[in-house]
Amino acid sequence: EIVMTQSPVTLSLFPGESATLSCRARQSVGSNLAWYQQKPGQVPRLLIYGASARANGIPDRFSGSGSGTEFTLTISGLQSEDVAVYYCQQYNNWPPLTFGGGTKVEIK
Amino acid sequence: QVQLVESGGGVVQPGRSLRLSCAASGFNFNAYGIHWVRQAPGKGLEWVAAILFDGSKKFYADAVKGRFVISRDNSKNTMTLEMSSLRGDDTAVYYCAVLGGPAGGSSFDHWGQGTLVTVSS
């Protein structure tokens, strides 16, 4: 099983700032990594797949980067609607599919 | 539009069984693998099981292997998760989902609204 570790657990920023979320895999997953956003009380929504490809309808302030074991999700110009928990998921080597523990993004 | 609708959740005693269903519409159901992902109250996402587009292969998380069985009926656009020997740590919202990543890296990624399973005496 590929363990995914996300940091930080919580990120609190002012509106307009950039958020940098990290995801680390215990072994290489190539570029087979996705990022999901889950707003309070809502279903997860795909933001990024293939480590850097934005899903349909996702604003360009969301960007993904990285490969191998280190990945980053950047939210440029944080907005109040971006308050959510963000999860990374590897699909390079499954089963099992594995998710990180999540990063909660808050607005100050 | 794409819809995935789960049903069958509820309160069940430890050791008992429960069947969850997922009804799909708005897309070519028999072209996609389908997954179950669960989320315990206040916790993160945990993948549970998956079945290939034609039902030829099934995959399970270690935590549910031997207790849960996934199946699908492509003639009815439905999928089921038969859960047995339920335990307290199976308590969660269960989502059925088409996941873009395992499908070869795709933006086609859809989740149902989830159904809550509570295992309690």
Image: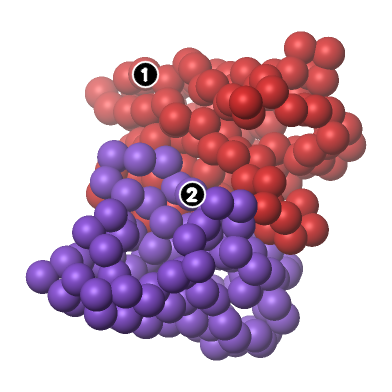
Would you identify the image quadrant in which residue B79 lies? top right
Q: Residue at x 78, y 18 (%)?
A: B73
What residue type is disc 2 on? Arg
Q: Residue at x 50, y 36 (%)?
A: B95
Q: Which residue lies furthest to the top in this view?
A: B76
Would you identify the image quadrant in which residue B26 lies? top right
Nearer the observer, B83 or A10: A10
Looking at the rendered structure, the secondary structure element under dot 1 is: strand
What residue type is disc 1 on? Gly
Q: Which residue is drawn at 29% across and 70% down?
A: A78
Q: Which chain's colour is red?
A: B
Query: Relative to residue A22, is residue B115 depicted above or below?
Result: above
Specify the label residue B83 is tagged with.
Answer: none
Query: Residue B33's spot in the image, x, y percent?
Result: 76, 40
| Mark 1 surroundings within 10 Å by alpha-carbon count, few (fewer than 14), some (14 through 19), many (20 or more) | some
User: Position of A83 compared to A3: left or right?
Assistant: left
